[in-house]
């Protein structure tokens, strides 16, 4: 692939037209063909793992020269274990029930109509992403499973890795007799390709951005195509007085430190005043000992004093804000003010505060006594995800194959006429 393309509008129009044609074929592709494409892609990717790692080394070098943060470099990096994880995701998606044509609801009307609401593909999905090359496989697989064609525009950081992974996906399509244009990768780093996708209303049905606040904000501001997205993952954990200390310790440590660069990483700890000097301070000391920079509010001791800017900050780094709250209602009010409707968690053993937390917050994902690092489509049993959607139209939370479908009504009768 060439990094520099002379005529971006012509290129993107060609890609879009090919995707639209492919989508028409995928709409009635058999579940067996789609599953074969994905399992073959997994085999091809594993066979090419050395080539993928070599391509990834080029991207890591590019990222270092560009000055990417440690968290972004972690997102970018591939090794055998991560490639194996990508292959496992491809196989898991292949093994899932095919959503296309599934009946969502069915009923009879007194007027003689038999009505079924069934799942149907969206059409063409555009995915714009930054440093995570695994999105190439995850997005391609989920779109294919849902009968959609997909146009992938990977970031400049993951340019070579994405090409290597895309090659395996195309090999799977070819083996299954499906159109190779079903999964296309934009062959340039030129940002003009992004702008072309955002306005391609004739060719793209929905855009999914995967990346930082800058990318997602740009897409949400400038897209003329509908968007599934979240702007930030400002993830809170509220520690109730009824929390089990051992559960709290292991959940908080995992939620913050397992992988700091993902959108499910905890960014703010809200601690009930009754346990601030006990369990609450123990949690902050534990995080500090683990290398986390704790920015503590009044009544707590940390590495730095928290400021107003720390509330509502997505660090994506070994940093966390901490604040004392007077009640679960106070915690809910703080999350409503500073949260991003992504993922929020309560640590508690009493049922009443959990019920209130679940009832009164409207984040896409709410958790109880579980690490927020589970905010992931793969962990939800979806095989993988194309992103986390925090809007309220169509898709919300992890966007898997089922969320990449719409529906249509199939109406039958025996000569029914309307009076």
Image (cartoon, rainbow, N blue to C red):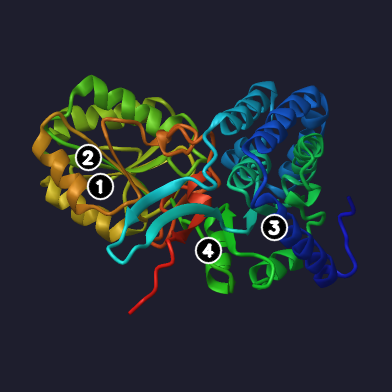
Label 3 CA crowd tier, 10 Å (few <14, some 14–19, many 20+): some
Q: Earlier in the sequence, mark 3 or mark 4?
A: 3
Q: Earlier in the sequence, mark 3 or mark 1?
A: 3
- Structural distance between the alpha carbons of marks 4 and 2: 40 Å
Which element type, helix, strand or loop, lies under badge 1? loop
Q: Which residue is identified by label 3?
A: 24
User: Does residue 345 appear to the left or right of 177 in the view shown?
Assistant: left
Label 4 CA crowd tier, 10 Å (few <14, some 14–19, many 20+): many
- Percent across and percent down for residue 269 are 29, 41
- Structural distance between the alpha carbons of marks 3 and 1: 56 Å
- Percent across and percent down for residue 196 are 72, 70
Q: Earlier in the sequence, mark 3 or mark 2?
A: 3
Q: Which residue is identified by label 2?
A: 300
- Percent across and percent down for residue 81 are 64, 21
* CB under 8 Å between discs 3 and 2: no
The mark tally for this picture is 4
Instruction: Name the residue located 61 percent from the left edge and 47 percent from the top edge.
Output: 143
* CB under 8 Å between discs 4 and 1: no
Marks 3, 2: nearer the viewer: 3
Marks 4, 1: nearer the viewer: 4
- Structural distance between the alpha carbons of marks 3 and 4: 21 Å
* CB under 8 Å between discs 2 and 1: yes
Residue 227, label in figure: 4
Q: Front-most of 200 and 375?
A: 200
- Structural distance between the alpha carbons of marks 4 and 1: 36 Å
């Amino acid at each position: 692939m060439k990094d520099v393309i002379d005529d971006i509008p012509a290129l993107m129009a060609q890609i879009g037209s090919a995707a639209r044609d492919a989508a028409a074929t995928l709409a009635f592709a058999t579940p067996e063909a789609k599953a074969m494409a994905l399992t073959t892609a997994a085999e091809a990717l594993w066979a090419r793992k050395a080539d993928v790692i070599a391509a990834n080394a080029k991207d890591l070098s590019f990222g270092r020269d560009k000055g990417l943060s440690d968290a972004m470099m972690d997102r970018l990096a591939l090794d055998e274990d991560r490639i194996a994880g990508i292959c496992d995701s491809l196989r898991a998606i292949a093994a899932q029930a095919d959503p296309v044509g599934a009946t969502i609801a069915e009923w009879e009307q007194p007027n003689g109509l038999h009505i079924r609401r069934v799942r149907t593909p969206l059409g063409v999905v555009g995915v714009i992403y930054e440093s995570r090359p695994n999105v190439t496989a995850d997005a391609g697989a989920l779109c294919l499973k849902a009968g959609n064609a997909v146009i992938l525009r990977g970031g400049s950081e993951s340019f070579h890795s994405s090409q290597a992974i895309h090659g395996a996906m195309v090999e799977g399509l070819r083996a299954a007799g499906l159109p190779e244009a079903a999964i296309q990768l934009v062959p340039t780093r030129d940002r003009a390709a992004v702008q072309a996708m955002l306005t391609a209303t004739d060719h793209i049905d929905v855009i999914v951005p995967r990346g930082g606040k800058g990318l997602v904000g740009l897409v949400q501001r400038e897209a003329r195509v509908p968007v599934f997205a979240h702007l930030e993952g400002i993830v809170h954990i509220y520690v109730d007085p009824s929390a089990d200390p051992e559960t709290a310790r292991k959940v908080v440590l995992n939620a913050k430190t397992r992988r700091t660069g993902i959108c499910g990483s905890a960014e703010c700890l809200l601690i009930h005043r009754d346990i601030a000097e006990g369990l609450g301070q123990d949690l902050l000391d534990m995080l500090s000992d683990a290398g986390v920079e704790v920015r503590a509010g009044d009544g707590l001791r940390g590495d730095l004093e928290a400021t107003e800017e720390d509330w509502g900050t997505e660090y994506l780094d070994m940093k966390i804000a901490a604040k004392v709250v007077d009640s679960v209602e106070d915690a809910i009010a703080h999350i409503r003010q500073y949260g991003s409707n992504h993922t929020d968690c309560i640590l508690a053993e009493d049922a009443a505060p959990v019920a209130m937390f679940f009832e009164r917050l409207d984040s896409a994902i709410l958790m109880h006594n579980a690490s927020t690092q589970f905010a992931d489509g793969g962990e939800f049993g979806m095989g993988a995800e194309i992103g986390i959607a925090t809007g309220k139209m169509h898709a919300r939370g992890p966007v898997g194959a089922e969320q990449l479908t719409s529906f249509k009504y199939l109406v039958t009768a025996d000569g029914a006429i309307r009076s």
